[in-house]
Amino acid sequence: MNFKSILIFPLIFSVIVFSQEEENLVSNPSFESMDGKLKKLKQINVAKYWDSPTALKADLFSKKKDAPVSAPVNIYGKEFPKDGDNYAGILMYSYNNKSPRTYIQSQLANPLTSGLDYCVKFNVSLSDLSKYAVNNIGLHFGVEAQSLEGKGDIIFDKADEFSRVIRDGENHIYNARYNWETVCGIYRADGKEEFITIGNFFNNKDTDYEKLKKLENFPGTQIPSAYYYVDNIEVFLIENMSDCNCSGQNKIKRESIVYHRDYATDGSEISTEIQLKRATVYFDVEGDKIDKMFLKSINSIADLLKSNKDLKLEIHGHTDKAEHDAIQEDPENEKLINLSEYRAKSIFNALTEKGISADRLTIKSFKAEQPAFPGYSMLSLAKNRRVELKLVK
């Protein structure tokens, strides 16, 4: 009898440890459980276990409610919940600090344990009517709850406070107004941290921002702020760093391949049309920057135009089929939509910088409508991500 107990105990213990590692310490992580009636803005406290640390409360949105707190469409934009029916909304930045920031805060199910590592993940989406996008979006761990009397920004100025803020490793500007982006990082606990607060804890001067144009097809007026939706927050214990897979949380670019071909010359003269064909420039996946390997081609075309003052060129930009398909997943991604034009503009700019008059160059965008090669193989796609130069006759 005693012998059996000794054998069984390690098995039970291992199951308990495993379950603790997988357990999300954030209660009500997607704001699905509500205590009270959601009718208006500034009601984050209707979501069980959530509140704001300042007098200006954050917002809560729901697919089950009407405007202005409805989802996916609401007063700030349009976004479907990442998980379930609800999500929160907070203001991370305003131009010249004209509007106070907002934050969301919750108490963890259990305090953190000193020396142990925890994986942190949460999702954000920039609202459609935000005029700005910013970096420095983070989650702060505190032994005590944050608290600020009145309306205002919680700005840290001590290294110890910043060390408790988890931001994404790249700390990039979160400018996706369609689809969710994941903030992900690993936190090593000092011990007894029990509260989490999500927001921007950095001064405006230390926060990078990007000014955005209003989306053409979205009604309403832009706000001079960066307002983000927040959903699906996770904090869980890990044994190894690899257990917190932060890579690949956001969109993964396809494997990079830039097509290039060298032409052997026998010293004989070639026609202008052939010179232009050989000067075709190819691009990386979803990129519009000219690779250094094509600078020789750019120089040769600039020399050709300088030697022939009457020549005029059309610059034809193209994308591949996979880049076109990617727009379906991210239909408000301005760069993807206009990528072929951006590629043509990069060649236009390179030639004008070398002294070629802009009135001798015309940009045309063909997107993926004129593939040079059929199929979806990596090589075919690489040959289609191109800019071609054509004589104006």
Image (cartoon, rainbow, N blue to C red):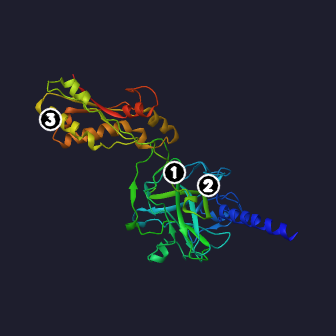
**Residue 374, how many percent across, how many down?**
43, 25
Q: CA distance from mark 2 to mark 3?
A: 60 Å
Quarter holding residue 144: bottom right
Observer-nearest of 350 and 56: 350
* Disc 3 crowd, CA 10 A, few/some/many (<14, 14-19, 20+): some
Q: Which residue is mark 2?
A: 69
Quarter holding residue 30: bottom right
The numbered dot on residue 303 is: 3
Q: Secondary structure at mark 1?
A: loop
N-terminal of the two: label 3 or label 1?
Answer: 1
View extreme (front): residue? 3
N-terminal of the two: label 1 or label 2?
Answer: 2
The numbered dot on residue 248 is: 1
On the rendered image, what quadrant is the N terminus found in?
A: bottom right
Three-letter amino acid code at disc 1?
Gly
Using the rendered image of the protein, determine whether residue 293 is visible from the camera's viewpoint. yes
Three-letter amino acid code at disc 3?
Asp
**Residue 88, how many percent across, how many down?**
59, 58
Using the rendered image of the protein, determine whether residue 102 is visible from the camera's viewpoint. no
